[in-house]
Image (cartoon, coloured by chain):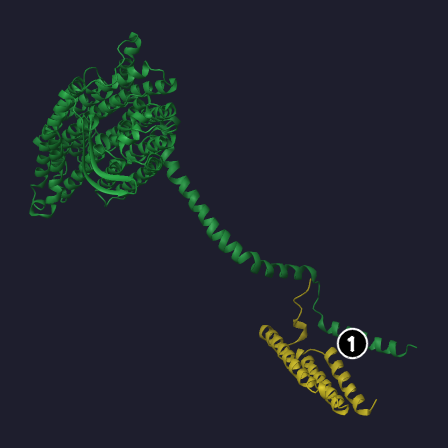
Chain colours: A yellow, B green
Amino acid sequence: MSMVYVNMFLAFIMSLMGLLVYRSHLMSSLLCLEGMMLSLFIMMTVTILNNHFTLASMTPIILLVFAACEAALGLSLLVMVSNTYGTDYVQNLNLLQC
Amino acid sequence: MNLFTSFMLTSMFMLLLPIIMSNTQLYKNNLYPHYVKTTISYAFAISMIPAMMFVSSGQETIVSNWHWLSIQTLKLSLSFKLDYFSIIFIPVALFVTWSIMEFSMWYMHTDPYINRFFKYLLMFLITMMILVTANNLFQLFIGWEGVGIMSFLLIGWWYGRADANTAALQAILYNRIGDVGFITAMAWFLANMNAWDFQQIFITQHKNLNIPLLGLLLAATGKSAQFGLHPWLPSAMEGPTPVSALLHSSTMVVAGVFLLIRFHPLMEQNKTMQTLTLCLGAITTLFTAICALTQNDIKKIVAFSTSSQLGLMIVTIGINQPYLAFLHICTHAFFKAMLFMCSGSIIHSLNDEQDIRKMGGLYKPMPFTTSSLIIGSLALTGMPFLTGFYSKDLIIETANTSYTNAWALSVTLIATSLTAAYSTRIMFFALLGQPRFNSLSPINENNPHLINSIKRLLVGSIFAGYLISHNIPPTTIPQMTMPHYLKLTALAMTITGFILALELNLAAKNLKFKYPSNLFKFSNLLGYFPTVMHRLPSTMSLTMSQKSASMLLDMIWLESVLPKSISHFQMKMSTIVSNQKGLVKLYFLSFMITLTLSLLLLSFHE
């Protein structure tokens, strides 16, 4: 596997670590989600351009669209939490206890 | 060719003249009541001529004037049936109305709308005449509805009073229920005999006449206040006393009985209908006599007395004696109207006091009213050789000697003694003893209008029975021979009622009134019938309609079945199934550890 792919794959793994391991702010996991999306996008574009896989040229655009929707959703959830509690600390999300 | 029809139609047409004159100047001045009264007295005099002709020669006429329309095979025309019943009833009704008009010239003297009052009374009389002389069911229905409407307008005369409006509406509603029966009978006759004329109906042979006769019985129940549709009659006492005297004692309420009398050729053959009529009349007469025993309003007692006598008339039809029932209608008109007029005289003199517990001792200040009240009550109870005796005693004798329902017979006899009981109660409380009214009451009966009108009906109450029953053509043969105890039954029951009531009243005069017993409450609250029947069916139907329309359709089917149930279900399920603690970081951490572990394990797998 060439170095470019390893590089981007590592970037993806970094963002994934950042999504799963965070201290207090919900915003940081959303940012890492964006990072994951970015690395995936670049990886997909480079692969398609290198292999001249013309028919799949629209897939990055579609990926962008879905990522934008999901970012909007995530932001709206963040805004709702922030409306209720004033901050976006994760320890506030404890209402669903049994 | 004699002038029979001319005189009769002249007499009828004369009654229309004051109504036609109501757009002219005559209506606006204060001589209009006098004009109406004189018109009616002349109409009475003229209608006596055909009555005399009928008495001497038995001439009956049917006048068919104007062919109105023909609906395919049904011919509707304006036709008057002047037979035994109409010819005798018209002079009696006109005589009584003449006296009542003169009485209301005194009673309603201070009313600003007295001209309109007389016009309404006259319109009522005209529609009653239409009813009585009708030869086909359509014309009878016109008269029937007309008397109902005028009754509504006259009961609600003092329309500022909420009770009067309620009573007028009650009268209309109960009469309407009876009208359903009438229309059923009309429809049946139209469909099965193709005629609304009496002649054709009586000739046509038909096997089973139960349906139309039941419809006519329902109509009579509604109009004549029989048990089941009776509460409107005591409530109708909200109207002025002349209205009570004219409509609800002599004229309108006998319309139902008159209808059944008109159909007597059909009722003769139908034993079932006769039994039904008999039982209905018997229960009416007993029930209303029981209710009359504990009422405190003098007009209500007389109203229940009317209802009881109407039940007696229906009983007479039930034992297949229509002519006796008709005789009782005519004689009853005299003394009942006079009883109402005497009550009106007492009420006005005591400054509009209607409660008999606040009267008393009127024996000396109002001698004329006292004597006419006593004579009227005696005539009502059937004192021998007064007016009521000729009809009531004959009815009781015929019922005793006929093969009839023993329960109905005994109930009628008990009601006869109760009649004497409540008549004694009226006389005792209103006339005898020490006065219980305010000291400054304007007791004055010296008005010639009052005296003359009551005097005329007084003479009628004493002599009319004799005169009528000795001048009418012979019809059904009365029972001539019977055992002496049966002959004296009516008299014995009446004397029992008198003596018992007098003793009870005298003995309990100064006793303290403790808590009322259950029987007293039953009688005073009219057998709980209005209380139950006016509230329960309406509450139930309104509640049911509200429940079905609002609750069932709107809130259950449209709101709750799909939308609310889905959301509720989901929320409940999610709270049941989920058991999370909200430790998000731990969950993400475990996710990452799983990933790493799986990566490490799989990459070192051979």
Q: Amino acid at mark 1?
A: Met
Query: Which residue occupies the extreme front position in the image?
Result: B73
- The correct choice, above or below, for B398 with respect to B17 in the image is above
Task: Look at the image and tell me whether residue B365 can be seen.
Answer: no
Q: Position of residue B182 (x, y in %)?
A: 32, 36
* Residue placed under numbered mark 1 in the picture: B592
Instruction: Please state which of residues B553 and B493 is positioned toward the viewer in this rendering.
Output: B553
- The correct choice, above or below, for B164 with respect to B349 in the image is below
- The correct choice, above or below, for B282 with respect to B160 in the image is above
Query: Which residue occupies the extreme top position in the image?
Result: B484
Q: Position of residue B413 (x, y in %)?
A: 32, 18
Q: How many marks?
A: 1
Instruction: Please state which of residues B600 and B355 is positioned toward the viewer in this rendering.
Output: B600
Q: Write down the quadrant of residue B205 in the picture.
A: top left
Instruction: Please state which of residues A42 and B250 is positioned toward the viewer in this rendering.
Output: B250
Quadrant containing the N terminus of chain B in the rendered view: top left
In terms of secondary structure, where does tag 1 sit?
helix
Q: Is residue B50 left or right of residue B594?
A: left
- Residue drawn at the location 88% of the way across and 79% of the way down: B603
Q: Position of residue B161 (x, y in %)?
A: 25, 44
Q: Write down the quadrant of residue B388 in the picture.
A: top left
Task: Look at the image and tell me whether residue B344 can be seen.
Answer: yes
Quadrant containing the C terminus of chain B in the rendered view: bottom right
- The correct choice, above or below, for B578 with respect to B411 in the image is below
Instruction: Please state which of residues B500 and B251 is positioned toward the viewer in this rendering.
Output: B251
Query: Which residue occupies the extreme right position in the image?
Result: B606
Q: Position of residue A91 (x, y in %)?
A: 68, 72
Q: Label 1 crowding class (10 Å Cα cut-off): few <14, some 14-19, many 20+?
A: some
